[in-house]
Image (cartoon, rainbow, N blue to C red):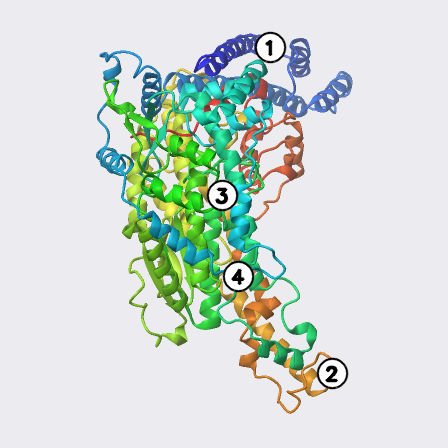
Amino acid sequence: MSGGAVTSTLRHVTDRKLAKLAEHQKSFEAQKAELLHACATESDAAEKVRILMAGFKRNGIPYSQGEASAKNIERFLEQARHDPSVSATLLQDWRAWLEQSLDMHTDKYNYADLFGRLVTEWIENPSDAMDELNAHSAAAATTHSRPPSDEAESFDMIGREEMHEQRKMLEKFIFNEPTIDTAAIKKYLDDLFIPVPKARGAQKTSLEQLRYNISHWDGIIHVDEDTIRSAIQGVLKADLFTGPKREVLVDLKSRPEVIKEMVDVLRMDLDSLKSWNWPGPVPVLLRRQLNGKYRAYMDEEVHTAILVHVVGAHLAVMLRNAFMAHFNSGAWVQAPYRAMTRVDRQRRHYFLGKKNVQADRFSVREMRRSTFRDDWFMTQMPTTVAEGNRDYGDEASDSDENAKSPLEIKQSLLRLATTEMLVNKKLYGEFTVFTSDFKWFGPSIPHATMYTVLEYFNLGQRWLDFIKKFLAAPLAFTQDGSAAEPKVRKNGIPMGHVLADALGESVLFCLDFAVHRKTSGAVLYRFHDDLWFWGQESTCVQAWQTLQEFSAIMGLQLNEDKTAAAKVVSSDNHSLAPLHKKLPRGVIRWGFLKLNPEESRWVIDQVQVDDHIKELKRQLEACRSVFAWVQAWNSYVARFFTTNFGQPAFCLGREHLDMCIETFERIQRSLFTESGAGNVADHLRGVITERFSGATAINCGRPIPDAFFYFPVELGGLGLLNPFVQLYAMRESSRKDPAEDLEQALLREKEAYEEFKERFEAGEVPFDETTPKNLESEPFMSLEEYMRFSEQTSEQLSDAYSTLLSPTDEAMVDHSPTVDTAMNKLPSGKYNTSGFSNSWLELKPYWKWIVALYFGETEKRFGGLAICEKGLLPLGLVSILRSERVRWQG
């Protein structure tokens, strides 16, 4: 199939389905009119009901409350022939119920028709951003195979000013080769890795084992049909392609005969990998992201993308395994700010007993190490070949992977930093944190730096040669038209390639280890090149100096705009000196939050929010269909804003949650006050009413129900997301004072201290041959000594630490038996809307809230939860259209 063929085929199917819907609707309305006319001309009340009942049965019209109710009415009608106690009121109620059932079917058809019109509008009116990307992508295929033409030059060459500025900076980095002192890099790596001694019982040093693991990789890549499907999925996940080219990949997954051919070709390519090179100039497209930055994506041929992905995924998994083995080799140690010495352990053994030297279960210290290992160390590298790319962006995406998604990692960073702030402030009276990233890391990382690091780790020459060719791609920006001369990349790595990520991570692995060694066991929390470090001030100074040294040697530059440090002190420790002079200045930021050190809390930067409200207005105004508008709203408001305000958590408290609610309220006021709409649903109601005034759902005299906007598409709704729902679901269980858990934990520790003291003074502490004998004349340890090593010894503290790290629980709304009945009537099978199901127990808390909130409305109007019958909706086409990420107006 050619690009766009999937959508084209589904469009054809949709047109047939909508035509059939129109036939059914016309037939039903004729039957309904006939029934109501016959009923109106009949004078006998009982006979009116019989006419309606017979019409339902003759035309196969389902009853709104099922066959059981109708069967009972038939029985009662027989009774009414002779029993005068069956009153006129009852007969009128039955007639009203039957006529209401007819009206419900009318509404279902009307809204299925409206849904179809909205989907048609979506297809026929793609966004300008999508049109532009598709045009550039289409032109790229012929840009260097034909002479310039007016058609090729007709693309909009006028972009936003920031796009031109960012492109100029991008070209400055990628087309200029920096001078790198590779000898200095090798010496730096020698000084870092060689002094690490062998672990007990090991035959090799950690560096020798690391080099052995990398150099002895056999590099055998087994290729079968699953390999191709996995690579296709990886390229799709990386969002490398848009529009028709993306559809080609989607279509390939369901074409086994083509995949078999691709297996043969890929095997031949791998056999001749030594002679591989780019087949020609590679087009580059600039795409705008929600955060306002433009990213450059290479638009290579589909087959080339699959080959590079397969090689990259295998290489990345091998490197990750080697680095993970190094982490577990004994070269990485971890200690809290105050670590127990041998004397400290002996004293606890003597006074508390052998079993109480340290915590039985995970201590805070152990939790830190396991969290870093599982969630942070080499997190950008795939654990399996099938996993492929780990995404990096501001937009959420649904994923079934066991590994944490990038957005989950980003949220856990906020919770971790906040929890550590609370713990350090409570235990030590102070907490220092700094954050930074590298300036234009992807485009700026020097090729010589990557080659030198990989050579140092003994990566085979075959792979080094391939990497050099991969990086030295001849690039041509599609915005320049067909006359543009390609230029060879001399610096940096491309977006959307697992191989590129692996190269960057290999260099930054050295940074992770350098910080760890220079700080005697602390760790750098890093996601890509976003760098966070915290703890005591002296340790932060060491880490900051290490980061500066690393950057200078590796040819990288720290981003001053993203670099900042802060010192938080407890209320009784304000006499502590201000932030150390060697640490950077600036405001610590996470998403739209900024840290207020004086109040020890995060606050939303409302100025930043104002800027994004303006941008959101612009993006929404650029939407040329209602469905596109809903997609943009869901991505920008319900995901981007929600993500960057921070997921409510126990460590953030209710104050943060209320701040999010107030800001979302302000966003809606800012967006819709001018139009006179009170909220997003009112706004869309007005838009749909104006655009589709000829639709029977609009001109029937009744307003569009709120459920139509918020219900999932499988029920005939638009799937509009409401950011308030999750916040209010969490508010009930949020903490007014986040530090309360810590206070309680330390209070229980003091109570435990008193119990231990009583046991010791009563002679109840068990003694054995291992009990120290040199402390017999000593009085029981002080409370200060007992509490000094809480991070290693206190189970109460680790429980509080774990709670503070957790997202706030969402309240489960109650539901009635009628809701259960309505849920059971929904069609079985898969629902593509994440978190939705036809079983109440399987619904995510968000959808439980939405169903409970709007069920009363849909039951009265549509006889249940389904606004339209699922079989009448063009859900296949909707699924394809929704699977494409929102392309933002540039």
Marks 1 and 3, how far apart at CA: 43 Å
Marks 3 and 4, how far apart at CA: 55 Å
* Residue 251 visible (yes or no): yes
For disc 4, the marked residue is 197
Judge the density around disc 1: few (<14), some (14-19), many (≥20) Cα neighbours within 10 Å.
many
For disc 2, the marked residue is 764
- Which comes sooner in the sequence, label 4 or label 1? 1
Task: Report the front residue among 137 and 454.
Answer: 454
853 relative position to 824: left or right: left
Query: Where residue 556 appears, x then y in whole percent?
Result: 32, 48
- Name the amino acid, label 4: Pro
Q: Secondary structure at mark 2?
A: loop
Residue in view at x 31 percent, y 13 percent: 145
Judge the density around disc 3: few (<14), some (14-19), many (≥20) Cα neighbours within 10 Å.
some
Marks 4 and 1, how far apart at CA: 92 Å
Marks 2 and 1, how far apart at CA: 91 Å
- Which comes sooner in the sequence, label 1 or label 3? 1
Judge the density around disc 4: few (<14), some (14-19), many (≥20) Cα neighbours within 10 Å.
some
- Which comes sooner in the sequence, label 4 or label 2? 4
